[in-house]
Image (spheres, rainbow, N blue to C red):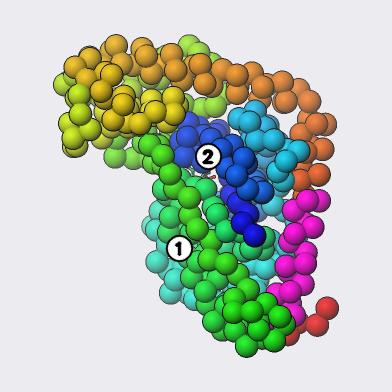
Amino acid sequence: PELVFSGVQPTGNLHLGNYLGAIKRFVTLQDTRPCIYCVVDLHAMTLPHEPAQLARTTREVTAAFIACGIDPGRNAIFNQSRVAEHAELAWALDCVARMGWLNRMTQFKDKAGKDRENASVGLFNYPVLMAADILIYRATHVPVGDDQKQHLELARDVAQKFNNDFAESIAAHGHGEAFFPLPEPVILGPATRVMSLRDGSKKMSKSDTSENSYIALTDDADTIVQKIRKAKTDPEPLPGHLDGLAGRPEAENLVGIFAALTDRSKADIVHEFGGSQFSAFKTALADVTIEKLTPIRTEMARLAADPGYVDTVLAEGAEKARAIARPNMDAVKDILGLIR
Ligand code: TYM
């Protein structure tokens, strides 16, 4: 059966990239298949973290999921550490994944920086835990932004190797040819890689030191206007055709954001704004951004004032998730020869 899984880290402010690249797509997918959406608090510990802040941001991301339109009744929304099977499967997959595979992960290289000897083992192991997140549900579809592509490929490699290495035992336990489906990345739409507003060559990121580089889901209307007004552009007016965006990363980024926010195509946007100056386009962009984000911000604030509700969602979501994860973990133990 088809199943959607995705995760978001509770590290700092959620931004427009997280929304357009991932959460907005989570909302669409809930109408097509059962969905499990996870606040990955264990992943947030791979870099130095502050405990009180982790608990707060975990509730904040949960509130954002709900405020963006994910229905906690129809789907499972929960925090990763609550369902121990994620960590349990991660160990089994650690023994399947190869050092060489993890050594090639660009996100590890970026996050570890120059001082690799000093990176946490968890940071190195991050992609295996992510594979476990997906595979513990035997999920088939994983909506993510473009930056998670390599991690998804690793998850598929891990699934494939497990299926191959234990093919005989998998068949003997009645699971047929393969135990894990190879999860498919769902990387769709005009905003799979939203770039920094200050630098069209860098992706929009919550760890960026310049607050003007991203629009947070909690930014108010004035802040949004200011940040978009200050966004970097080039001196030419907008082109009337998509070809005209080539070599103009800042222009392309703003057009992509506009398209994603309004559920239109980039071609459609340049067709409408071709020949306009950026000042006019930015005003229109700020308007649609405010229109889409204001209800989300308002609902997040309402939910922040009702932590009891958010905690209930997390607890119930964890129950639903565990009901799928536990039998799958038991099957993995049987396949591996672990007595239970
Ligand atoms: P995270 O928390 O960094 O980001 C959450 C989601 O937002 C997407 N995203 C973007 N999309 C477009 N433009 C951007 N500038 C941008 N920045 C972030 C990310 O691609 C992601 O989809 N490793 C994951 C969390 C994770 C996960 C999983 C995801 C853990 N386990 C299992 C899928 C399945 C991460 O760090 O996302």
Q: How far apart are marks 1 and 2 (CA)?
A: 20 Å
Which residue matches tag 1? 153
- Could you say which quadrant of the image residue 261 lies in? top left
- Dot 2, how many residues are within 10 Å of its Cα: few (below 14), some (14-19), or many (20+)? some
- Apparent side of residue 137 relative to residue 122 in the rendered image (left or right): right
**Is 115 rendered above or below residue 97?**
above
Task: Report x, y in % for residue 306.
Answer: 78, 25
> How many numbered discs, if any?
2
Q: State whether label 1 is within 8 Å of ligand 1.
A: no
- Residue 22 seen: yes
Task: Report x, y in % for residue 39.
Answer: 65, 45
Q: At 64% from the left edge and 63% from the top edge, which residue is drawn?
A: 138
Sequence-wise, the earlier of marks 1 and 2 is 2
Q: Is residue 325 magenta?
A: yes
Three-letter amino acid code at the position of disc 2:
Arg
* SS label for mark 2: helix
- The one nearer the camera, 271 or 112, is 271
Magenta stretch: dominant secondary structure:
helix
Q: At 35% from the left edge and 31% from the top edge, which residue is drawn?
A: 265
- Apparent side of residue 181 relative to residue 186 in the rendered image (left or right): right
Magenta residues, as a range?
319-336
Three-letter amino acid code at the position of disc 1:
Glu
Q: Which numbered circle lies on residue 25?
A: 2
**Is 105 rendered above or below residue 337?**
above
Q: At 83% from the left edge and 78% from the top edge, which residue is drawn?
A: 340
Q: Is residue 315 magenta?
A: no
**Is 336 rendered above or below residue 319?**
below
Mark 1 or 2: the one toward you: 2
Task: Report x, y in % for residue 206.
Answer: 49, 37
* SS label for mark 1: helix
Q: Which numbered circle lies on residue 187?
A: none
